[in-house]
Amino acid sequence: QVQLVESGGGLVQAGGSLRLSCAASGRTFSSYATGWFRQAPGKEREFVAAISRSGGSIYYADSVKGRFAISRDNVKNTVYLRMNSLKPEDTAVYYCAAAGPKAAWEYRRTYAYDYWGQGTQVTVSS
């Protein structure tokens, strides 16, 4: 089992920045790739970013590429999502998730993930 707890969400003006954290406990965190997803009201949960177990491979959704940066610290068992140049359309509940070994393209799919956090709200005002 892996327990994931997100933090760092909040209210920010358009153009601002936030850094989300996802703290993991339980089984060896470095054994899992980690992803960030988001879900806006009335919409499906969508992929934002993912990072491999070692941090050597990183994937982004086109909508956040160049604005968001995912990173991880396997000593601290924490994954981060730095979000810059935030837009109102980034408003959503952000979830982190952990997955065992998968093909790279699968990390963009919710079904690839075995463990999920409870989510943290990000609201971007215009």
Image (spheres, helix red, strand yellow):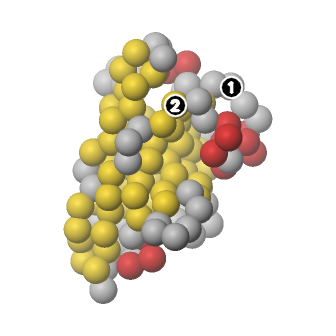
- Residue 45, above or below 86: above
Q: Residue at x 55, y 25 (%)?
A: 32
Is 20 displayed left or right of 11 in the figure?
Answer: right
Marks 1 and 2, how far apart at CA:
13 Å
Label 2 amino acid?
Answer: Tyr
- Residue 91 at x, y = what percent? 39, 70
- Residue 45, above or below 41: above
- Residue 100 at x, y = what percent? 63, 25
Q: Residues within 10 Å of mark 2 (few under 14, many from 20)?
A: some
* Callout 2: SS: strand
Q: Residues within 10 Å of mark 1 (few under 14, many from 20)?
A: some
From this viewpoint, which residue is outermost toward the bottom? Answer: 126
- Residue 33 at x, y = what percent? 57, 31
Residue 7 visible in image: yes
Q: Quadrant of residue 105?
A: top right
Would you name the residue on which mark 2 appears?
115
